[in-house]
Image (spheres, rainbow, N blue to C red):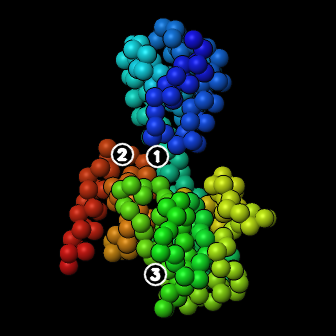
Amino acid sequence: MSNLELMNEYLKKQNKISEQTKKTYIQTATTLPFNITTTQPTIIKKLKELYTNPNTLSLYLNMIILLRRDNNLEHNKLVKLRNDLREEIISIRKENMSDSKNTLPSYKEIIDKLKDMNGIRYVINYLILEYGLRNKDINLLYVNKLPNEQNENENYISKSKNGYKLTINDFKTEKSFGTKIIDITDKKFKEEFNKLNIKDNSYLIPKKNGDKLKISSFNDKIINLTVDGLGEVKLFKIHIKYLLDTKDFEKLEELVNTRGTSLATILKSYNVYNNDMKKNEKKNETIENEVKDNIKN
């Protein structure tokens, strides 16, 4: 059987995989130029010849391991390679974050630029900087009044007594955190959002015909709207660095909730100081304890 046939057989037995994930699996199976049922050493040799980027290599390995496991084929050597790649990916990410420590603008510079913004640019950057929201979180549908029966695939912004309310149902860690509710009372945010004159039941950034943008198109638009085109991930890293420098653990704890992620993840994945994982494990643990102590007090 071809890789595509093996993948189709596998997907027939799956009922909890999203359509987008299915498309990714099928595309990956289609583009692999050799059959996944060959021997493990041959697979490893061919993969290394074809793909030098560890992230790409890992993507194909995941698919191959998945199908070989489903067909009761040996995959222990492939799993070991995948585990080794994880360490390499983490190391590269830490190096990149270490480099960015000296190249990213300061939080003060970012906030100064935010103050000079208006309209949609202010709204987008404020939501990212103040609440650590991801792009997906701010693909918002504006409603004058929040519906009683909400669409679980929609994130809403609606009027509230003192400003605006975000009801975020569809985000990366929704299964762990549930719906996120954020009340916004910032004066400038209210003024700038009002200026947008968005009609009831309309998206914050829609397609030309008013429909909801797919996340890939939405991401492209967002990065162009962010301060200096930095994007939400770099802006979040800048904010985290500032909070660690100033020891503002209370705000750090707030971001845990509004972003919808664990403190441990923030300290490992978004901390520009964390270029040496082993060296910083104790430091991160200390910070986590300080945050918890700060909240208790």
* Quarter location, residue 24: top right
Q: Residue at x 52, y 43 (%)?
A: 18
Mark 1 or mark 3: whose residue is earlier in sequence: 1
Q: Residue at x 65, y 17 (%)?
A: 33
In the depicted structure, whether residue 46 falls above or below residue 183: above
**Residue 29 percent coordinates (x, y):** 60, 24
Work out which quarter of the rendered image holds the C terminus and state it. Answer: bottom left
Q: Which residue is mark 1?
A: 94
- Whether pointer 2 and pointer 1 mark residues with C-beta atoms closer than 8 Å, the reply is yes
Q: Is residue 134 visible?
A: no
Mark 2 or mark 1: whose residue is earlier in sequence: 1
Q: Nearer the viewer, residue 127 or 281?
A: 127
Q: Which residue is mark 2?
A: 277
Q: Residue at x 65, y 87 (%)?
A: 194
**Residue flagged by tag 1: what amino acid is it?**
Lys
In the depicted structure, whether residue 28 falls above or below residue 163: above
- Whether pointer 2 and pointer 3 mark residues with C-beta atoms closer than 8 Å, the reply is no
Mark 2 or mark 3: whose residue is earlier in sequence: 3
Closer to the eye: label 2 or 3: 3
SS category of the residue bearing label 3: strand
Q: Which residue is mark 3?
A: 183
**Residue 251 percent coordinates (x, y):** 38, 74
Q: Nearer the viewer, residue 270 or 19?
A: 19
Q: CA distance from mark 2 to mark 1?
A: 8 Å
